[in-house]
Image (cartoon, coloured by chain):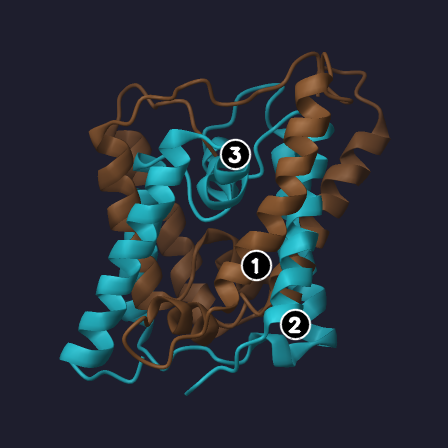
Chain colours: A brown, B cyan
């Protein structure tokens, strides 16, 4: 966005967001009952979420290992902005653990939450502003915000 | 409420998510992690904002359109109070930023790149999610 950014990357990024939303809807992940059904290993377990991850990871791994790793730079930028850290640390584990609790309570993670927010789901109208507040709270608490894995 | 197992739809929808994430990787060269994209947009830096906002506009705008043309895809909302979802949202927002990612950034992109951090994070949030659902559904006997 440094002045002369052409229009078409913006269109591609907009479409990527829309395809993400469509993928969540097609896969059933905009239905919190299916997410909770996956997490309910001791009830009537619904393995659908594992198939969503399988489909997404298969396509993404192909793009990464056969595409990005062989390109000098991405199409719209001077370099790839990918996480470089590989060490496991306490904030990673604590953060993932806290996230999982909220995920299990609501059936929402950030992506489906935002899509349901757009669709006008009452539950997401509570969830999304609170999630944004939680993010801001964490960013305030961390004086030196860590670079993200995603 | 029991949701039916949908292997084919879920696999196809997952592939669409993969295509979207691959597009962000090969285009702007970014990780398609919703947490990272939204969190970064909240901490706006010049030159780093546009791609985030376009993607988020597509994601939320996609929800607006889907809510009108395919409302059935938003059934299965949990019967809980607003405060319940607000509390869950706080935990999700705080936890995903602290752990640098959620189901998309760690679960799809990180796992696809075979990142050790993401593989561990994904195992941890599925584990604590499963424990939470076990406690709420089977120990407390809640509706969800």
Provide residue B101's location: percent of width, then percent of height: 41, 39
For the point 79% across and 31% down, the residue is: A9
Disc 2 packing (10 Å; few <14; some 14–19; many ≥20):
many
Tag nearer the camera, 2 or 1: 1
Q: Are marks 2 and 1 on the same chain?
A: no
Kindly tell me whether residue A131 is visible in this rendering.
yes
Q: Residues within 10 Å of mark 1 (few under 14, many from 20)?
A: many
Looking at the image, residue A42 sits to the left or right of residue A15; the answer is left
- Relative to the observer, which residue lies in front, A12 or A56? A56
User: Secondary structure under badge 1?
Assistant: helix
- In the picture of the structure, the residue carrying the numbered disc 1 is A52
Q: For mark 3, what is the residue? A: B41
Q: Using the image, tell me which numbered label, if any, was put on residue B86.
A: none
Q: CA distance from mark 1 to mark 3?
A: 26 Å
Pick the residue in front: A145 or B21. Answer: B21
The quadrant of the image that shows the N terminus of chain B is: bottom left
- Cα distance between the residues tagged 2 and 3: 25 Å
**Helix, strand or loop at mark 3:** helix
Q: How many labels, in total?
A: 3
Q: Residues within 10 Å of mark 3 (few under 14, many from 20)?
A: some
Q: Is residue B50 visible?
A: no
- Marks 1 and 3 in Cβ contact (< 8 Å): no
Nearer to us of marks 1 and 3 is 1
Q: Chain of mark 3?
A: B
Indicate which disc residue B67 carries.
2
**Can you say whether A40 is above or below B120 in the image?**
below
Q: Are marks 2 and 1 in contact (CB under 8 Å)?
A: no
């Amino acid at each position: 966005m440094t002045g002369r950014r052409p229009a078409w990357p913006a269109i591609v990024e907009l479409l990527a967001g829309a395809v993400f939303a469509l993928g969540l809807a097609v896969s059933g992940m905009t239905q919190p009952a299916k997410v909770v059904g996956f997490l309910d290993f001791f009830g009537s377990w619904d393995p659908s979420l594992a198939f969503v991850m399988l489909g997404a990871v298969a396509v993404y791994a192909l793009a990464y290992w056969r595409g990005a790793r062989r390109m000098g730079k991405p199409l719209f930028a001077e370099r790839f902005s990918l996480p470089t850290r590989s060490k496991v640390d306490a904030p990673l584990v604590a953060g993932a653990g806290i996230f999982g609790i909220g995920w299990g309570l609501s059936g929402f993670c950030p992506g489906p939450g935002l899509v349901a927010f757009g669709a006008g789901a009452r539950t997401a109208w509570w969830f999304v502003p609170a999630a944004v507040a939680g993010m801001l709270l964490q960013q305030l608490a961390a004086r030196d915000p860590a670079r993200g894995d995603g | 409420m029991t949701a039916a197992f949908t292997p084919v739809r879920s696999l196809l929808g997952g592939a669409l998510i993969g295509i979207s994430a691959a597009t962000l990787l090969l285009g702007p060269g970014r990780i398609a992690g919703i947490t990272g994209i939204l969190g970064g947009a909240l901490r706006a830096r010049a030159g780093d904002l546009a791609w985030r906002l376009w993607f988020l506009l597509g994601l939320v705008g996609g929800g607006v359109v889907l809510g009108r043309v395919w409302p059935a895809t938003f059934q299965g909302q949990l019967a809980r109070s607003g405060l319940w979802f607000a509390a869950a949202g706080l935990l999700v927002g705080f936890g995903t930023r602290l752990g640098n990612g959620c189901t998309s950034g760690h679960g799809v992109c990180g796992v696809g790149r075979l990142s050790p951090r993401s593989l561990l994070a994904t195992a941890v949030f599925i584990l604590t999610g499963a424990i939470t659902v076990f406690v709420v559904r089977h120990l407390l006997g809640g509706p969800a």
